[in-house]
Image: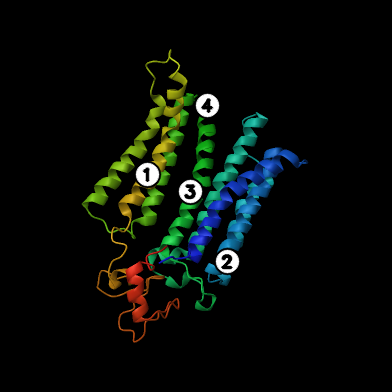
Amino acid sequence: MARAMTDRCFRIVLLLALMPLVSGAWALVGSYVGGRSAWGSGSMVGSALALVSTIVIWHRCVRWTVPRLLSTAGIALVATGQVVLWHPVWTTGWRGTDEFLCTSQALSGGGLALGALALTWWGGLLTRCDPRHSAPPSRRVVMTPNAVRLAIGVALLPLLSGLFFVEYLALNEAPWGWASRSCTWLSYETCAVVATAVWFLLWRRAVVWDSTRRLGSLGLALLFLASPLSVFWAYPFGATGLGPLCETLCLLSPLFTFALWLAGTAWLWRDRQPHALVGRLVGVGAEGAARCPTCGYNLHGLREVRCPECGWASTVDDIVQRSIVGTLAVP
């Protein structure tokens, strides 16, 4: 049976599409808009485009309250403040380096802002302490914990990119004079620690941990955390034509292991029985009570197949049909 893309998946794809869109807008504006530095003009337009587009993409999935409106406005102001001021946290004395530092700050600040917005809007879904973070039932767009995790995961991309370059420049300009390879290694290592910790914290409640998943995840994490050491590897056949290629591979290997970490954990942590019985698809808690598949609300004892928190509703025959095609197991 053919199935259309869910509304939440559609919005996540739009969020992913923002990455090349913002990059292209940054390059275009930086090349043709005068008055400010090229990088500053591009970063200002790119940051505004990213924040406004993110709010537009997700506004129907948020239960807007006064505290959330104020928090959203505050996060947007803080994220754009540094871009508007366009001043590095420290000056290196070189205009080009200062411009690059400001751009890196804008990247990391934008990633932090995207993650902070997701936590402000739907943080209760990840802890299950406040399932009412989802939108009202009348608007028919209900957020799920897995969609929140993916939205925060997307924010890691600009955050880690900016963090790497900010730390590299800080270490490179340090008075004790770090070597370039040492700066690269420590910057990679910091990003690896942040990526591993955030990804694990996001998904630890969604995974049924067994020995295979524990050992596999530990092995992937150790490989990822050890990969920055590759920048110190010396290619023994540097006189050959493959020397520069191997040098580049050593410098870029943490990026490849980052991709392996994401893909490997997705493969390990996935649901191995997507067409399981009704109770598993609806969501059966540890206490044996059925839970709403969208917000996790305990459905035990209800006289109708309707969640009183988020408004999700179904029928018994619909649940049986969905259990066959697995349509409830979508993010």
Label located before the other in sequence (4 or 1): 4
Helix, strand, or loop for circle 1? helix
- Which tag is nearer the camera, tag 4 or tag 2? 2
Asked whether 120 or 210 is in front, the reply is 210
The single residue placed furthest to the top in the displayed view is 239
Residue 43 can be seen in this image: no
Judged by depth in the image, the label closer to the viewer, 4 or 1, is 1
Q: Residue furthest bottom?
A: 303
Tag 1 residue: 261
Q: Residue furthest right?
A: 35
- Within 10 Å of disc 4 (Cα), the crowding (few <14, some 14-19, many 20+) is few
Secondary structure found at label 4: loop
The type of residue carrying mark 1 is: Trp
Q: Residue at x 44, y 19 (%)?
A: 243
Mark 2: few/some/many CA within 10 Å (<14, 14-19, 20+): some
Disc 1 to disc 3, C-alpha distance: 14 Å
- Using the image, tell me which numbered label, if any, was put on residue 156: 3
